[in-house]
Image (cartoon, grey):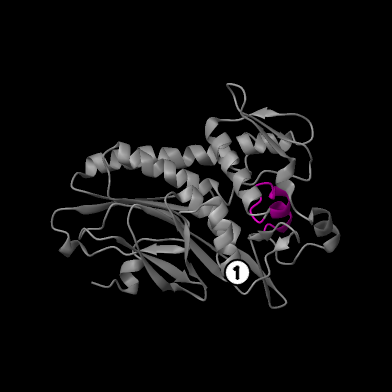
Amino acid sequence: MNPNRREFLALGVGALAVATLPRAVRPRDRLVRRTIPVMGTIAELAVRTRNEEWAQRAIDAALDDLRRVDRTMSRFRDDSDVGRANLAAGHGRVAVSEDTAEVLSAALMWARRSDGRFDPCLGRVSELWHVETRRVPPPMAEVRPLQDGHFYRDLELDLTGSVPYVLLHSRRAAVDLGGIAKGYAVDLASRTLRDHGMFNALVNAGGDLMAMGTDDHGKPWKIGVRDPDHLEQVAAVLEVSDRAVATSGDYLRFFKYHGHLYHHLMDPITGEPWRTHMRSITVEAANCMTADAAATALYGENPVSAREVLARAAPGARVVNSI
């Protein structure tokens, strides 16, 4: 049974949409869903179950994971691990949680193995452009000091003691985990659902998604990649089971100026939004943190170079769609 547009859009906000089946064909199981704003996006959880009370408890616990990651890794909060590290840049080190240290460690690996295409320290660049509120590009006099990239080289992560520490050696660098933390949060939430006995479920955080188990017919979940030019339509359909997918695209956060689209995906070298004909890229991987980082690192990359980066950083991951 092929899902139509209405069924896809019954579940899905952001870059990915999920096909759900009409209740008439689900006589025993039902889909329990919850949607909340978190991490600057909309997160959606869906659990296939015969016991709604258990499912609701599992979803409560999984949502706590998403909120915890938001509290500790948001660059918009001065009291988060990331916020405190950025405030202390150039002055001293700060203690961070093990969760934050794990994400930073993975982010630094991606930065090195992608030759800086993925950079977890683009916070100053993202703050300068802030495409959600801007209507005109910033002057080049402000962009130029943030060019040439490799900000991640100013990030030092100390894991030698009982408590992880972070040190930013320069105020040019500011931690921004927007390209990896959502994926990590999705992984935590998915693990929590499994710990509560929920093995057929979906966790979607604005385009970073984990599909667990199977749908109501015992088949892989059908995931729709949205059409950048027609967001109410899907450009491709993926079948996913116990795998993660993540999409990076230029069509959800942007502004237009003199006919040019300025989006939120930043080029670490130019200090500006990537200039590319690519509109979106979707990566599948064993876990969502890998898929999230890969989709960020490979945005705008040619297929040959993309395969080379994946071979170095995530051999089991693959690009499943690019537009």
Image quadrant assignment for residue 253: bottom right
Up the image or down, 114 lies above or below 184; here it is below
Q: What segment carries the magenta color?
A: 117-130
Reading the image, the residue beneath label 1 is: 302
Q: In this view, does 201 lie to the left or right of 206?
A: left
Q: Is residue 217 left or right of residue 56?
A: left
Q: Is residue 55 left or right of residue 84?
A: left
Q: Which amino acid type is shown beneath numbered disc 1?
A: Asn
Asked whether residue 307 is in view, the answer is: yes
**Nearer to the camera, 238 or 116:** 116
Residue at the image position 74 percent from the left and 33 percent from the top: 88
Asked whether residue 250 is in view, the answer is: no
Image quadrant assignment for residue 57: top left
Residue at the image position 69 percent from the left and 78 percent from the top: 259
Residue 180 drawn at (x, y percent): 55, 49
**Nearer to the camera, 112 or 135:** 112
Residue 138 drawn at (x, y percent): 78, 62
Image quadrant assignment for residue 74: top right
Q: Is mark 1 on a helix, strand or loop?
A: loop
Residue at the image position 57 percent from the left and 71 percent from the top: 279
Q: Which quadrant of the rendered structure holds the N terminus?
A: bottom left
Residue 263 drawn at (x, y percent): 64, 65
Residue at the image position 56 percent from the left and 30 percent from the top: 97
How packed is label 1: few (under 14 Cα within 10 Å), some, or many (20 or more)? few
Q: In the orientation shown, which residue stands out farthest toward the top?
A: 162
Q: Is residue 29 left or right of residue 206?
A: left
Residue 85 drawn at (x, y percent): 68, 35
Q: In the orientation shown, which residue stands out farthest toward the right?
A: 141
- As for residue 216 lying within the magenta part, the answer is no
**Nearer to the camera, 283 or 46:** 283
Q: In the orientation shown, which residue stands out farthest toward the left?
A: 27
